[in-house]
Amino acid sequence: MIRLMIGNQKGGVGKTTTAISLARCFAGRGLRTLLIDADPQGSIAVTLRQRPERYLADFILSQLPLEDCVTGVAPDMDLLCGNRETSAMEQRLLASYGREYVFQKAFKPYLGRYDAIIVDVAPSISLLQACAMVFCEQIVIPVSTDTLSVSGAGATILSAKTIAESLNCPIAVAGLLPTIVNRSYGLTGVVLQMMEQLGAAYSIPVLPEIRTDQAVARAARAHQMLADVDPRSKALQDYEAAATVLLKSLGWKKQKGKHG
């Protein structure tokens, strides 16, 4: 099973677009995929104009059945939305025993329903980020072509190492994902080189870059996914390439007779 947390301590790096796009790419290949929005801003619900009756906080705190809280947003793709109640949920969890394992415990009964789970987290060090790291064990860090986003990636790597060591659990970074890449800008080459150096320092691969694409803005305005707005967009092609590398590196093999 594939479980990925999408995060960077710096905002504005294409994190939500990456979470949605990778989830859609996985689902498009027949993987039953669950996308979880653990960001209190509820960006995914806003982006896809979803207004479900139940949210992540309802699932975790009220222990409602997962099927009562998710929304099908594409073939083989379910979404568990976050909202402003996510912050209140996090505050309540701070006083709980074994709080970093809350996601692991809550989702364990449902793991057999999905082949891939992607968790989008807020651009800050938080309990929910720790919960997502412990649950997913693998992280993809989107890094836009500015120096601050590289610093944010470094902070995310160090945070993962600290949590892994303190809780004695396996957490690894599956890849640094260059996003919003425009090679015509002079700084782009410098930042990409910084990413390569950061990856080399921690033995983390740099994934295929995601080029700038007006289709991303059109999809946001239409409150739709890239695949629905422009199936031939270059950004979607790039996300497909990144998905291919991730699935291979994480050892995904389609089971015989599964998904038709």
Image (cartoon, helix red, strand yellow):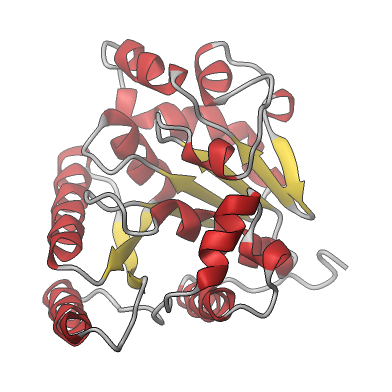
Q: Position of residue 173 (x, y in %)?
A: 30, 63
Q: Position of residue 184 (x, y in %)?
A: 29, 88
Extreme residue toward the right, this view: 260
Q: Is residue 1 visible?
A: no
Q: In which quarter of the view is residue 40 placed?
A: top left
Vertical arrangement, residue 225 with respect to residue 196, above or below: above
User: What residue sits 44% from the left and 45% below the top?
Assistant: 120
Q: Quadrant of the C terminus?
A: bottom right
Q: Can residue 61 be seen in this snapshot?
A: yes
Left or right of 214: which side holds 192?
Answer: left
Q: Residue at x 49, y 38 (%)?
A: 37
Q: How many marks?
A: 0
Residue 195 sits in quarter: bottom left
Q: Is 139 in front, or is 152? A: 152
Question: Looking at the image, which residue is at 13% across and 80% down?
Answer: 197
Seen in the image, is 227 located left or right of residue 160? right
Residue at 37% from the left image edge and 78% from the top image edge: 207
- Image quadrant holding the N terminus, namely bottom right
Location of residue 88 (image quadrant): top left
Residue 32 lies left or right of residue 185; in this view the side is: right
| Residue 225 image point, x, y percent | 64, 57
Nearer-the-camera pick, 149 or 118 = 149
> Looking at the picture, does residue 248 appear above or below residue 124?
below
